[in-house]
Image (cartoon, helix red, strand yellow):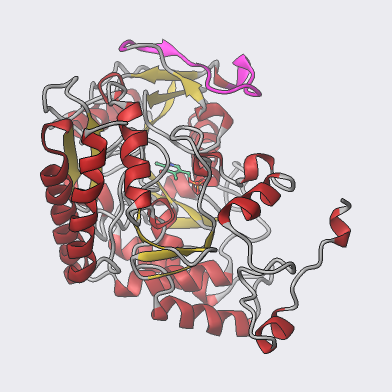
């Protein structure tokens, strides 16, 4: 069927007819299955970010019509307690009124201009004020753009090529950083995916997390997730981040913290505020956009001013510093007071206890502040993983069973065993009470696999 014959809803006419314009596809209200099936005919795999697919856990995704606070509703009207929260991008909860209002106001002012705007200035200032290492901030459109920009910036500034990254850390879809590591030893990067030529990762060195590597004068930058949150949640061991700082200083390499998850999630100062180590550059994304597309690089003034137009390293973006994204980001930051972080941390602690109580010896919960990760099975005898090799011993089949048991019981986790679990200002006490009951019910069915 030619797609041009598929009618698109007219939102105004839909509402007038008493129809739900979000869910309706012009052919009545679909099921998750029919809607996802139809999506796969327009979008490869039916998803615009491959981690959203249910490849690792089996089955078909629920299709989200809307969310509010801690909950999402699928197109069939089923409600889930959402622990995905847009992979951490949403921290106030879905459709928070402060963000909704900020977006309405911003939309009314025009959505993009190609000229400087007050909101981008305010967001950059807000980041600088809260993260002292960020003397200057350049806003862009994704975490991926931030990491690819720091690679170019570090190489351009130092005149060196090598980038050191850590096995199990994730830095988005940046070619130079899509390198696979070997097992437990420092290796020169191998392409982490088809489409990345060896040349693109020939200067990327992959080393084990939580061990300070030798850094020599060929290294432009060391890029690290200061708390690893893409292999479950793995805390930096004492001395690791400090050791990286010292090693980089000695070699004249830049230390880059990828705080795309941890930034404004662990607290207003991010992981660097929590652990007291000052990087030269920091990548942001997720929380600073209040649920809209955003990324940012912040850092030392002299380093940041190496970016064009002042310096020799090119960066530009049509929608960079976008009025809508910066409005949502400013609205999010306005709510993230010290009390708000205390509250979120209390909820993360409660979530850890809920999981522990429900799953007992079958789980090890790793929590760093507001970030929660789980490791399933007893391969580490109840110890939290400290690197990727250890993280990979998680029981993936058990995760798939737990995932589906929770989904059946109205709780949404990310469809992958290595994602963090996110709570925020939407997960109030009544939601957490409800979650506790659902976890216990789901855990019972996981304990006795069919
Ligand atoms: C999500 C993430 C990225 C990529 O950000 P996008 O906005 O998805 O491009 C980079 N680094 C880390 C640590 C992330 O968690």
Is residue 275 shown left or right of residue 394?
Answer: left
User: Which x, y percent locates residue 436?
Assistant: 18, 56
The answer to which of 4 and 90 lies nearer the viewer is: 4
Give 301 or 427, whichever is nearer the viewer: 427
Residue 184, horizontal then vertical, whole percent: 30, 12
On screen, residue 295 above or below 403: below
Residue closest to the far bottom: 16
Q: Can residue 280 be seen in this view?
A: no
Q: Residue 194 magenta-drawn?
A: yes
Residue occupying the point 39% across, 75% down = 96
* 64 with respect to 25 (left or right): left
From what the image shows, is residue 73 above or below residue 43? below
Name the residue at 49% across, 74% down. Answer: 327
Question: Foreground: 111 or 223?
Answer: 111
| Residue 339 placement: quadrant | bottom left
Instruction: Tally the numbered discs.
Output: 0
**Residue 114 lies in the magenta stretch:** no
- Write down the quadrant of residue 198 in the picture: top right
| Magenta stretch in the rendered image | 184-200
Residue at (26% x, 46% y) in the render: 442
Q: Where is residue 423 in the image (x, y as percent from the top left)?
A: 28, 58
- Of residues 450 and 294, the one drawn nearer to the viewer in this rendering: 450
Would residue 383 be found to the left or right of residue 374 on screen?
A: left
- Which image quarter is the C terminus in? top left
* Residue drawn 40% across the image and 45% down it: 414
**Farthest residue, direction front:** 450
Q: Is residue 362 left or right of residue 420?
A: left
Q: Is residue 433 visible?
A: yes
The spot of residue 271 in percent (x, y) is: 25, 47
Q: Up-down: is 50 above or below 160?
A: below
């Amino acid at each position: 069927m030619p797609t041009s014959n598929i009618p698109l809803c007219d939102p105004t006419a839909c509402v007038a007819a008493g129809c739900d314009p979000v869910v309706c596809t012009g052919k009545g209200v679909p099921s998750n299955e029919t809607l996802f099936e139809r999506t796969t005919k327009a979008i490869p795999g039916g998803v615009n970010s491959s981690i959203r697919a249910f490849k690792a856990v089996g089955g078909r995704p629920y299709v989200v019509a809307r969310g509010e606070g801690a909950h999402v509703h699928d197109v069939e009207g089923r409600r889930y307690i959402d622990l995905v929260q847009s992979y951490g991008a949403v921290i106030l909860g879905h459709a928070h009124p402060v963000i909704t209002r900020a977006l309405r106001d911003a939309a009314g002012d025009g959505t993009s201009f190609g000229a400087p705007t007050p909101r981008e200035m305010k967001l950059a200032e807000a980041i600088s004020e809260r993260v002292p290492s960020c003397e200057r901030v350049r806003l862009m459109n994704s975490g991926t753009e931030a990491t690819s920009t720091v690679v170019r910036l570090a190489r351009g500034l130092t005149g060196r090529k090598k980038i050191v990254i850590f096995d199990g850390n994730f830095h988005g879809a940046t070619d130079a950083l899509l390198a696979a590591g070997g097992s437990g030893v420092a290796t020169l990067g191998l392409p982490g995916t088809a489409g990345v030529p060896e040349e693109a990762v020939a200067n990327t060195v992959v080393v084990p997390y939580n061990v300070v590597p030798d850094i020599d004068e060929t290294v432009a930058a060391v890029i690290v997730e200061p708390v690893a949150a893409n292999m479950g949640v793995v805390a930096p061991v004492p001395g690791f981040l400090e050791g990286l700082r010292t090693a980089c200083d000695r070699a004249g390499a830049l230390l880059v913290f990828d705080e795309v998850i941890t930034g404004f999630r662990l607290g207003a100062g991010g992981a660097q505020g929590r652990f007291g180590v000052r990087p030269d550059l920091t990548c942001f994304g997720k929380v600073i956009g209040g649920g809209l597309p955003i990324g940012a690089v912040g850092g030392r003034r002299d380093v940041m001013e190496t970016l064009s137009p002042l310096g020799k390293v090119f960066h530009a973006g049509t929608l960079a510093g976008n009025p809508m994204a910066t409005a949502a980001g400013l609205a999010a930051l306005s709510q993230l007071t010290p009390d708000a972080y205390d509250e979120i941390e209390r909820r993360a602690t409660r979530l850890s206890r809920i999981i522990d109580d429900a799953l007992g010896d079958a789980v090890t919960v790793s929590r760093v502040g507001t970030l929660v990760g789980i490791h399933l099975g007893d391969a580490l005898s109840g110890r939290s993983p400290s690197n990727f090799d250890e993280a990979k011993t998680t029981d993936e089949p058990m995760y798939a069973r737990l995932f589906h048991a929770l989904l059946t019981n109205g709780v949404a986790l990310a469809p992958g065993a290595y994602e963090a679990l996110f709570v925020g200002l939407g997960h109030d006490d009544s939601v957490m009470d409800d979650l506790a009951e659902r976890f216990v019910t789901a855990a019972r069915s996981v304990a006795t696999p069919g």
